[in-house]
Amino acid sequence: MNLKLLKLKVVKVVKMRCKVTCNAKIPNGDSFYLYLSPVVGGSEENKEFFKWTPGGCVYFYVVDPSTANQFELGKSYYVDFSPAE
């Protein structure tokens, strides 16, 4: 029986999920600026997210109006971060 040893590389993958609220949607010609910030309260889930991500800002410049139209002022969204490979 021929057994080969395998060397495995252990990689720690960083993942983070935030819950944010759309605070501003500013038109700029055919595009939009979107500003989102972490949730602060209003529900037990929001309090738990606030505990781990109490501050920050996510800012996007969106050139597709149909994409920007999916964002509503005051509505909350999940944002997931993971490494790009």
Image (tube, grey):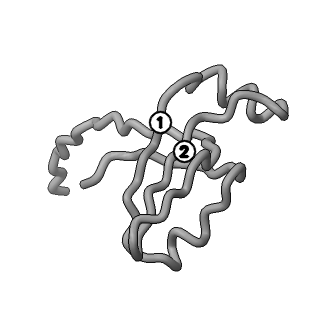
Q: Are discs 1 and 2 less than 8 Å apart at CB? A: yes
Q: Nearer the viewer, residue 45 or 10?
A: 45
- Residue located at (70% from left, 28% from top): 40
- Residue at figure coordinates x 53%, y 48% from the top left: 79
The image quadrant where one finds the C terminus is bottom left
CA separation in Å, label 1 and label 2: 6 Å
Q: Position of residue 8 (x, y in %)?
A: 23, 41
**Residue 84, above or below 11:** below
**Image quadrant in which you'd find residue 17:** top right
Answer with left or right where residue 60 lies relative to residue 34: left
- For this view, does 9 lie left or right of residue 79? left
Residue at which label 1 appears: 57
Q: Give the crowd class for mark 1: few <14, some 14-19, many >=20 residues within 10 Å.
A: few
Residue 6 in picture, x, y percent from top left: 19, 46
Q: Residue at x 66, y 25 (%)?
A: 50
Q: Amino acid at mark 2?
A: Leu
How packed mark 2 is, by other alpha carbons closer than 10 Å (few <14, some 14-19, many 20 or more), is many
- In this rendering, the answer to whether 55 lies above or below 20 is above
- Tag 2 residue: 36
